[in-house]
């Protein structure tokens, strides 16, 4: 039996965790509170934890200066399409590497993993030339296809493979006795059991797509087609200087849905990591 901690020890641990939490919470608190401050108060020293005055017009200006609703929709639908596409590709590839025996499977898998070591800056120029010739520049297709078949999908494939490796072989043997083929075994047995891993893949992939910055600034040139990370850089004054309070208001609106999704899905996220051997 595990020995229970004394009330004094629990209080000390909770106090220590609250102190360790400050470096993570302070930037978010500063972003939210500074979004309603006058610009002169944002960089005041020492920092003001609570604004002395509130300027809520910064949030209305976010929508006045940019087509922010359209940009929000762009990020949302691109993130959804990329997430679904990556889940499909990575689950099928991960299952193949984990459960199907074919020549040089481990070697091919290691070559695939090498894709994680290649920085996106290395491939961005040839990708731009390829999409330019295909007539896809200033469209959302590069932002959809590159993540689905790029590094995010490689990482997702690794996560799915690690999960499928842990499945008992008896499940597949019983399914074969019942007359199921390989694809039906994958769809009806392996995939339903992989929900925790799929949840982790979905969160990782959506966050990557939502925060993608390099590819949008390379492939997109129209404000109506911008995604949110690119849109945040466009809040500037007549002299090209940043409008800090408006930028922070837009950043707060940008971070809000991601925070809500993570809070709702954090249980599945932790379960997925535990089942894929990524936990500490």
Image (tube, rainbow, N blue to C red):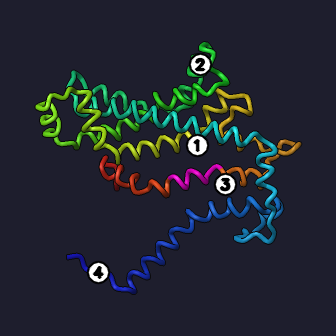
Which residue in the structure is indicated by mark 1? 211
Q: Position of residue 139 (x, y in %)?
A: 64, 25
Mark nearer the N terminus (2 vs 1): 2
Residue 4 circle label: 4
Number of other residues with Cα within 10 Å of mark 4, as a class: few under 14, some 14 to 19, many 20 or more: few
Above/below status of 179 relative to 27: above
Q: Position of residue 238 (x, y in %)?
A: 88, 42
Q: Residue furthest top?
A: 133
Mark 1 vs mark 4, CA separation in Å: 42 Å
Q: Residue furthest right?
A: 238
| Dot 4: element | loop
Number of other residues with Cα within 10 Å of mark 1, as a class: few under 14, some 14 to 19, many 20 or more: some
Part of the protein shown in magenta? 254-261
Q: Position of residue 223 (x, y in %)?
A: 74, 33
Q: Is residue 59 visible?
A: yes
**Picture quarter containing residue 220?**
top right
Mark 1 vs mark 3, CA separation in Å: 13 Å
Q: Residue at x 63, y 36 (%)?
A: 74
Mark 2 vs mark 3, CA separation in Å: 33 Å
Q: Is residue 196 or residue 212 the one in the foreground?
A: 196
**Picture quarter containing residue 167?**
top left
Which residue in the structure is indicated by mark 2? 131
Mark nearer the N terminus (3 vs 4): 4
Q: Is residue 117 visible?
A: no
Which residue in the structure is indicated by mark 3? 252
Q: Residue at x 66, y 42 (%)?
A: 72
The answer to whether 29 appears left or right of 278 in the picture is right
Mark nearer the N terminus (1 vs 4): 4
Figure disc tally: 4
Q: Position of residue 265 (x, y in %)?
A: 45, 53
């Amino acid at each position: 039996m595990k020995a229970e901690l004394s009330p004094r020890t629990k209080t000390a641990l909770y106090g220590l965790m609250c102190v360790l939490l400050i470096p993570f919470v302070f930037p978010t608190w500063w972003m939210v509170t500074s979004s309603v401050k006058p610009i002169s108060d944002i960089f005041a020293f020492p920092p003001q934890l609570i604004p002395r005055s509130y300027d809520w017009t910064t949030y209305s200006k976010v929508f006045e200066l940019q087509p922010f609703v359209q940009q929000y929709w762009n990020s949302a639908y691109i993130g959804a399409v990329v997430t679904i596409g990556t889940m499909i590709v990575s689950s099928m590839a991960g299952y193949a590497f984990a459960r199907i025996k074919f020549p040089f499977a481990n070697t091919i898998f290691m070559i695939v993993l090498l894709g994680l070591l290649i920085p996106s800056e290395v491939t961005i120029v040839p990708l731009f030339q390829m999409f330019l010739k295909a007539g896809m520049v200033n469209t959302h297709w590069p932002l959809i296809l590159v993540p689905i078949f790029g590094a995010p999908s490689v990482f997702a494939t690794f996560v799915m493979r690690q999960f499928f490796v842990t499945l008992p072989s008896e499940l597949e043997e019983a399914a074969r006795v019942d007359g199921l083929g390989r694809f039906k075994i994958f769809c009806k047995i392996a995939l339903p059991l992989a929900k925790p891993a799929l949840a982790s893949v979905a969160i990782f992939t959506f966050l990557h797509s939502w925060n993608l910055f390099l590819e949008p600034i390379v492939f997109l040139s129209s404000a109506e087609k911008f995604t949110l990370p690119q849109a945040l850089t466009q809040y500037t004054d007549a002299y090209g200087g940043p409008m800090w309070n408006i930028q922070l208001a837009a950043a707060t609106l940008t971070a809000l849905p991601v925070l809500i999704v993570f809070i709702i899905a954090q249980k599945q996220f932790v379960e997925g990591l535990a089942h894929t051997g990524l936990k500490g």
